[in-house]
Image (cartoon, rainbow, N blue to C red):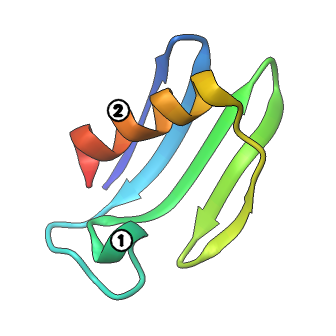
Amino acid sequence: MWKNGTINGYAYWTKCFENGSQYGINEGRISKLAIRKDGKLLYNFERGLDFNNLDAEGKKAYEQILAMHN
């Protein structure tokens, strides 16, 4: 259910389910996602987007996370 890792210096934590849901990102499997860089929280989704302060490189990491887990 919980998965974490690092992509290009961006650390992430996700909560993924077997099936997609209306509460997931793009109605997908990820219901929670936090992305940090250098200890600073840049993106947070918890059954809805809380905030997104990702730069261009962070957006690439975000897309990779979705491709792997959503």
Q: Of all residues shown, which one is farthest toward the bottom?
A: 22
Q: Residues within 10 Å of mark 1 (few under 14, many from 20)?
A: some
Residue 12: x %, y % from top left: 54, 35
Asked whether 2 or 14 is in front, the reply is 14
The alpha-carbon separation of the residues under discs 1 and 2 comes to: 14 Å
**Residue under label 1:** 26
Q: Residue at x 70, y 38 (%)?
A: 54
SS at badge 2:
helix
Quarter assignment of residue 45: bottom right
SS at badge 1:
helix
Residue 36 shown left or right of residue 26 in the figure: right
Amino acid of disc 1: Asn
Q: Residues within 10 Å of mark 2 (few under 14, many from 20)?
A: few
Residue 40: x %, y % from top left: 84, 32
Q: Residue at x 35, y 32 (%)?
A: 64
Quadrant (top left/top right/bottom left/bottom right) for the C terminus: bottom left
Q: Of all residues shown, which one is farthest toward the left?
A: 18
**Residue under label 2:** 64
Amino acid of disc 2: Gln
